[in-house]
Amino acid sequence: MGYDILIVALCVWNAAVLLVYGADKSRARRGAWRIKEGTLIALAFALGAAGAMLGMILFRHKTRHVKFILLVPLALIINICIFYIGVSF
């Protein structure tokens, strides 16, 4: 039962990260103030990689930037490892 709360929290967090990527894409289209790339990558490494990757795919955002192509999948692998290690304890 305790893991249910963790899974829901991770889903909510990743949905929030997805929305941040979507907001940044929207701002890019309008020429408005942007979210720093470092912040977007940090959100991925802060257990939000699934939302970041989904945001990249759905919004076609940051898909031409090498650091995003490399770091977001790396963050996803690390996120999965952290979750797996945390659940196994």
Image (spheres, rainbow, N blue to C red):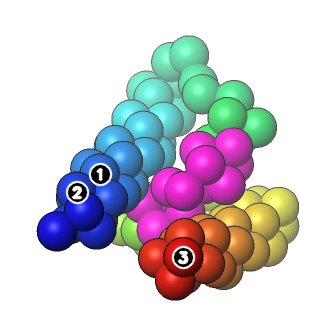
The quarter in which the C terminus is drawn is: bottom right
Q: Position of residue 31 (x, y in %)?
A: 53, 24
Q: Is residue 87 visible from the viewing direction of this image?
A: yes
Q: Which residue matches tag 3? A: 89
- The residue drawn where x is 50% and y is 18% is 32
Q: Please determine whether, in this image, residue 80 is positioned above or below residue 12.
A: below
Asked if the stretch drawn in magenta spans residue 42, the answer is yes
Q: Amino acid at mark 1?
A: Ala
Q: Is residue 73 visible from the viewing direction of this image?
A: no
Asked if the stretch drawn in magenta spans residue 61, the answer is no
Q: Position of residue 7 (x, y in %)?
A: 29, 65
Q: Which residue matches tag 1? A: 9
Q: What is the chief secondary structure element of the magenta stretch?
A: helix
Closer to the camera, 43 or 25?
43
Proximity of marks 2 and 1: CB atoms separated by less than 8 Å: yes
Q: Amino acid at mark 3?
A: Phe
- Nearer the N terminus, badge 1 or badge 3? 1
Q: Which residues are magenta?
A: 41-53
